[in-house]
Amino acid sequence: MSVAKPDPERDDERVETQELAARAHAGESERFGELYERIAPSLYTWAEIRIRPDLRQWVDPSDVVQEVWCRAWKIFDSFDPQTVTFRYWVFRVAKNVLLEAFRKLESPTFKARSRDAADSRALELADVPDSATAITRRVAREESLQLFAKWVQTLDEDDRMLLVHHGLEGLSQAEVAERLQMGREAVAKRWQRLLARVVEQKLPRELFSAVQ
């Protein structure tokens, strides 16, 4: 089995992303679009993993990604690049978006409406920039992301949650260890094994937080 090694170029790109986030927060609004383009593949894959197939009729991964863009832009002033990474922050936004969508599915009003309208959506998108829509559509067509999401579903629960929380959402290994009630050394070893499997199967490792 090959061993995943640290990649200085990926670390450099992570730093660059955080610098972009700081510049966007300082007033260079055009940088936000660059940040969105960088994080969109990871967000889309995350949504693919988190949304059950039987719910896709009402909650689509593309809708989630676009709603996250709109929501994150509206509250971008609350982002502090000095205390948190952009990835960690934007995935907190994403978790809130998805939680609200799932809650809406359970509401009596939505259930009644969805019986009459087959195309009912839990997320009612409005004022999504054309650039965000174009990026999301391109990401949704990437076969490698679909293959990655399907592969993740074959993992056991602990590995799947480790990949979601640490790899995609950007939580630290210590935070994941606490969530999964595992030792930090065990989490570190599991993560190295997961990375090795991703490399062996030529799956898109650039989705992980090592980049952003």
Image (cartoon, rainbow, N blue to C red):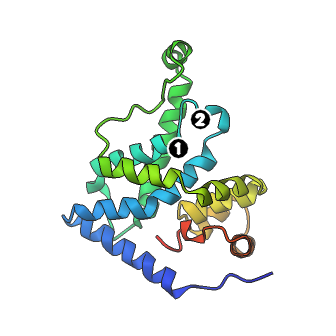
Mark 2 near mark 1, Cβ–Cβ under 8 Å?
A: yes
Question: How far across and down, in percent of the image, does residue 193 sit?
Answer: 75, 74
The local secondary structure at tag 2 comes to loop
Q: Residues within 10 Å of mark 2 (few under 14, many from 20)?
A: few
For this view, does 159 lie left or right of residue 102?
A: right
Q: Position of residue 46 (x, y in %)?
A: 57, 53
Q: Amino acid at mark 1?
A: Pro
Lower sequence index among marks 2 and 1: 2
Which residue lies at the image location 52% right of the left edge and 21% below the top edge?
A: 107
Q: Position of residue 133 (x, y in %)?
A: 37, 47
- The numbered mark at residue 61 is 1
In the picture shown, does residue 89 fall above or below 57?
A: below
* Front residue of this view, candidates 155 and 91: 155
Q: Is residue 135 above or below residue 125?
A: below
Q: Quadrant of the N terminus?
A: bottom right
Residue 62 in sight:
yes
- Residue 12 position (above or below residue 197): below
Identify residue type, mark 2: Arg
Q: Secondary structure at mark 1?
A: helix
Between the residue at mark 2 and the residue at mark 1, the CA separation in whole angstroms equals 8 Å
Question: Which disc is residue 180 wearing?
Answer: none
Q: Position of residue 69 (x, y in %)?
A: 37, 49
Give the crowd class for mark 1: few <14, some 14-19, many >=20 residues within 10 Å.
Answer: many
Picture quarter containing residue 82?
bottom left
Residue in view at x 35 percent, y 51 percent: 132
In screen coordinates, is 107 left or right of 67? right
Q: Residue at x 37, y 77 (%)?
A: 16
The residue located at (55%, 33%) in the rendering is 102
- Of 15 and 201, nearer the camera is 201
- According to the image, label 2 marks what residue? 56
